[in-house]
């Protein structure tokens, strides 16, 4: 791999990401720079929810774009399915010099700013026989098309890193949601049971226990 030192430095920057939006943006930015292309996207293949999705920024908010996975893949006609979806389903690297000329072209998935992508590279990253993520890179800048060997190796390495980073992001999101729920419940409790001191807290607990066990003691 010719750019190995650059890839390793990019990996060092990416492993510290802890939020979904910054992870998707970080991997897209590093991939675009390493491959010298106009745009890169990281897609997550969720087999439980039967969807493939990516995350992007809209103003200050994080938005997701989802594409349902086909329910039946045996003898599936790939016409118009999208190159990134085809890579996910066929478990193989796809590299084309002109995306619009490929029969698998999808006007939304394989376009940039409303225009069909020129060159496109889609690299699925597998785990336990299933595609977990797919890197999509479009519009090679310095050459007419992507190198299906060297460029694919770079994206495959970043894909391995992305799976670990996204797991951390999911854990952080779950913990954040738990903390927010706990705070909301405590606030609700406080709103209904004003507490000024420790005695008020003990009295509130005693009332709650009496109500719970229907005790008048």
Image (spheres, helix red, strand yellow):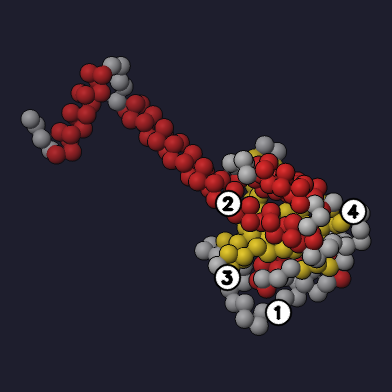
User: Which-is-in-front pick, marks 4 and 1?
Assistant: 4
Q: Nearer the viewer, residue 40 or 201?
A: 40
Residue carrying label 2: 164
Residue drawn at (12%, 38%) of the image: 214
Q: Nearer the viewer, residue 154 or 192?
A: 154
The CA distance from mark 3 to mark 1 is 22 Å
Check contact, mark 3 vs mark 2: CB within 8 A. no
Q: Earlier in the sequence, mark 2 or mark 1?
A: 1
The CA distance from mark 2 to mark 1 is 33 Å
Check contact, mark 2 vs mark 1: CB within 8 A. no
Q: At numbered mark 4, what does the secondary structure look like: helix, strand or loop?
A: loop
Q: Local crowd at mark 4 within 10 Å, few (<14), some, or many (≥20)? A: some
Seen in the picture, residue 171 relative to 195 is either above or below; the reply is below
Residue drawn at (74%, 49%) of the image: 7
Please provide percent x and percent y for residue 83.
75, 67
User: Which-is-in-front pick, marks 4 and 2?
Assistant: 2
Please provide percent x and percent y for residue 118.
87, 61
Residue carrying label 1: 77
Q: Earlier in the sequence, mark 3 or mark 1?
A: 1
Residue 141 badge: 4
Residue carrying label 3: 129
Residue 27 badge: none
Residue 122 seen in the current view: yes
Seen in the picture, residue 79 relative to 184 is either above or below; the reply is below
Check contact, mark 4 vs mark 2: CB within 8 A. no
Check contact, mark 4 vs mark 3: CB within 8 A. no
Name the image quarter holding residue 196. top left
Please provide percent x and percent y for residue 138.
81, 57
């Amino acid at each position: 791999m010719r750019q190995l030192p650059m890839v390793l430095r990019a990996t060092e920057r990416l492993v510290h990401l802890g939020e979904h939006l910054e992870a998707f943006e970080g991997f897209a930015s590093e991939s675009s720079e390493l491959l010298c292309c106009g745009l890169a996207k990281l897609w997550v293949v969720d087999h439980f929810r039967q969807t493939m999705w990516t995350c992007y920024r809209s103003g200050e908010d994080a938005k997701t774009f989802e594409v349902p996975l086909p329910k039946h893949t045996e003898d599936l006609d790939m016409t118009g399915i999208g190159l990134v979806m085809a890579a996910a389903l066929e478990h193989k690297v796809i590299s084309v010099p002109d995306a619009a000329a490929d029969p698998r072209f999808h006007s939304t998935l394989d376009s940039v700013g409303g225009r069909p992508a020129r060159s496109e590279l889609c690299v699925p990253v597998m785990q336990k026989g299933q595609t977990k993520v797919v890197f999509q890179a479009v519009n090679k800048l310095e050459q007419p098309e992507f190198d299906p060997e060297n460029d694919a190796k770079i994206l495959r390495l970043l894909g391995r890193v992305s799976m670990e980073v996204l797991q951390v992001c999911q854990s952080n999101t779950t913990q954040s949601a738990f903390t927010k729920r706990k705070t909301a419940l405590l606030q609700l409790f406080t709103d209904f049971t004003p507490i000024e001191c420790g005695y008020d807290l003990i009295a509130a607990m005693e009332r709650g226990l009496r109500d719970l066990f229907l005790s008048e003691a």
